[in-house]
Image (cartoon, rainbow, N blue to C red):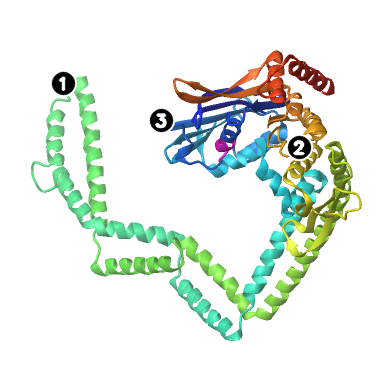
Amino acid sequence: MLQNLHVKNLALIDEVEVDFAEGLNILTGETGAGKSIVLGSVSLALGGRYSADMLRKGTDAGLVELTFSVNSPETIRKLEELEIHPDDGQIIISRKLTGSRSVSRINGETVTASKIREVASALIDIHGQHEHQSLLYKKNHLAILDAFAKDADGVKKQVQEAYRTYRAVQKELNEADTDEAQRLKEISFLEFEIEEIQNAGLSEEEDLEIEETYRKMVSGKRIAESLEEAYAYLAGENQENAGELLGRAVRAIADATGYDKHTEELYGQIMEVESLLGDFSRELRDYTDSLSFSPEAFYEVESRLNDINHLKSKYGNTVTEILEYCEKQQQRLQILQDYDHYLDTLKVRLKDAEDKLGELCEKLSRIRQKEAKKLQEKIREGLLDLNFLEVQFEIRFTRTQDYTAEGTDDVEFMISMNPGQPQKPLAEVASGGELSRIMLAIKSVLADKDEIETLIFDEIDVGISGRTAQKVSEKMGVIGRKHQVICITHLAQIAAMADAHYAIEKKVENHVTKTSISRLDEEASVRELARILGGAQITDAVLRNAEEMKNLASGLK
């Protein structure tokens, strides 16, 4: 659930912090007080559109921060699939706004806007006028049915996998449709490439050795000169070399060994030094000799390296990649040389893939149609609860022209809201106010199956009043028993159902307009209901009416 909202320097908001509660959270306030700004800031934090003019006048940076507590195992699983891990059961989403730029973070780590939206889809569901309008498009009707038909999830995944296989084979067969001249041309080209690679006799071991040998040859002269100089100092013809001087030291100590035991130990040590120096000098000489090579040898190594690099520039960055490329081309050549068999095999594979996909689509459709009967009856009952007096609702199935990743079902919501009138597509008969109630009915039906913990409703009361408003408030209360609901409303009937009631006010301080939000206690909530009911004149009778409305609402919870 959404625990906390913190907004700073956004539109009319200087700084606002709100702690939301479980159940039904209601936000009320005068027109223009900033109700839409408060909930708009939630959308902004979750990746909504941002422009610099959204910042509070006179500031150069703003901030929106949402703190969610996550308890549902299913929600935690979805977040972990997105590589987001709750910290002590919390997810903190923030968006810092500066000029024309913004930076989003989850638990302190910078993330992309697309990542924010993916995470948000697991945490919160926002319904405003735009979301109500989405019911007008029948492409969204199938998604609503699938959200209800949880039994279809496994088969739907099988359909998606079978569809990917079917499309891949179909694509391969379409690409295989080539004329004889083009096929012969490709065969000739493949044979040339394969022959060029095979004639090179490549091996991974040689690739490493030839580069090492070439580097040694290129730098061999400089290395040899340095080693020759070192050898001259150690054992060269110069009488002052290290070997000659060390020999003199050995002979000098040898003359003193008969007089002192410690001198004998020193003599043994210097003999070891002389032996090590001799071994090192011989090894140095041998390695220096190995660095000498003929111009012919250098040319041979350089030519071989050039040949290998030429192949790398054409077929792969390494010898391994070149050999893999050659194997792939050999497979393609084999296919082209036995092309009729290849086409026949592809056609069999496509038939098998289509048969499997068709069976799964039929299975998915049967499950959907079974669940659709339950859903349409529940939605009809929900619409009756929302004061649709003579409503008929049907989920109508037709078949798509071709296979899709969603199967072959084309689903559309049909409705009749007047006796004797035929059922028509929802888009043809529903007004804005009716759409909001229909969406509310759908949400109440899905409440048992929806794993998203927080629902936000904006403009749910558009175009309704009286008895209908009372019915909508009762339905909101039902949803609030299983979800956290945050709702902006202008109607007292809905506001009276609040488990937590917040007032949004616009004040002028030092000639500066600011929006503030505060949670109301029981008495203040009654006064706010009276303001909604009575307008400018709040009489004792209006207050009593508001109190009675609050008491009646408490009895319905």
Q: Between 524 and 425, which is closer to the camera in this rendering? A: 524
Judge whether 458 appears above or below 154 on screen.
above
- Neighbor class of circle 2 (other Cα within 10 Å; few <14, some 14-19, many 20+) is some
Marks 1 and 2, how far apart at CA:
122 Å
Q: Which stretch appears magenta?
A: 43-47
**Residue 121 x/y as whole percent:** 65, 40
Residue drawn at point x = 73 percent, y = 69 percent: 350
Residue beneath disc 3: 58
Q: Residue furthest bottom?
A: 181
> Which label belongs to residue 259?
1
Q: Is residue 269 visible?
A: yes
Q: Is residue 102 visible?
A: no
Q: Position of residue 104 (x, y in %)?
A: 51, 36
- Reading the image, the residue beneath label 2 is 464
Amino acid, disc 2: Ile
The number of discs equals 3
Q: Residue at x 80, y 39 (%)?
A: 441
**Separation of residues labelled 1 and 3 (CA atoms):** 98 Å
Residue 128, image x and y in percent? 66, 40
